[in-house]
Amino acid sequence: MGYELMDVTRRALFDGTLTMAISHPMEALARQTLAALVKSKRAGPDAGAQNVMLDFDIHTSENL
């Protein structure tokens, strides 16, 4: 889902269908993913595994 919660998601949180939603800014996610891919490609096959941390928000009915 994008950075903002959609109306359907907000309603689902309010009526109890969902207990939580995770959202993240799509542009930042795409930028970080591409940067990690480029870094991995430049490092080569002998560089080993890499960890990438992506920011996200957790929304619950209590914090809407």
Image: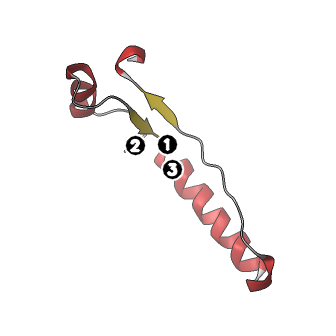
Residue 38 falls in image quadrant: bottom right
The three-letter amino acid code for the residue at tag 3 is Glu
Q: Secondary structure at mark 3?
A: helix
Residue 41 drawn at (x, y percent): 70, 79
Badge 2 amino acid: Gly
Quadrant position of the N terminus in the picture: top left
Q: Which mark is residue 25?
A: 1
Q: Amino acid at mark 1?
A: Pro
**Colour mapping:** secondary structure
**For residue 1, side relative to residue 37 (left or right):** left
Horizontal and vertical percent for residue 51?
69, 59
Tell me whether circle 3 and circle 1 mark residues in contact (CB < 8 Å): yes
Q: Is residue 6 above or below residue 40?
A: above
Residue 17 screen position, x and y as percent: 21, 30
Identify the residue at image location x=74%, y=84%.
45
Residue 57 versus residue 27 in the image, above or below: above
Tag 3 residue: 27
Spatial distance from mark 3 to mark 2, Cα to Cα? Answer: 9 Å
Q: Are marks 2 and 1 in contact (CB under 8 Å)?
A: yes
Which one is in front in this view, the residue at disc 3 or the one at disc 2? 2
| On-image quarter of the C terminus | top left
Q: Position of residue 11 (x, y in %)?
A: 21, 25
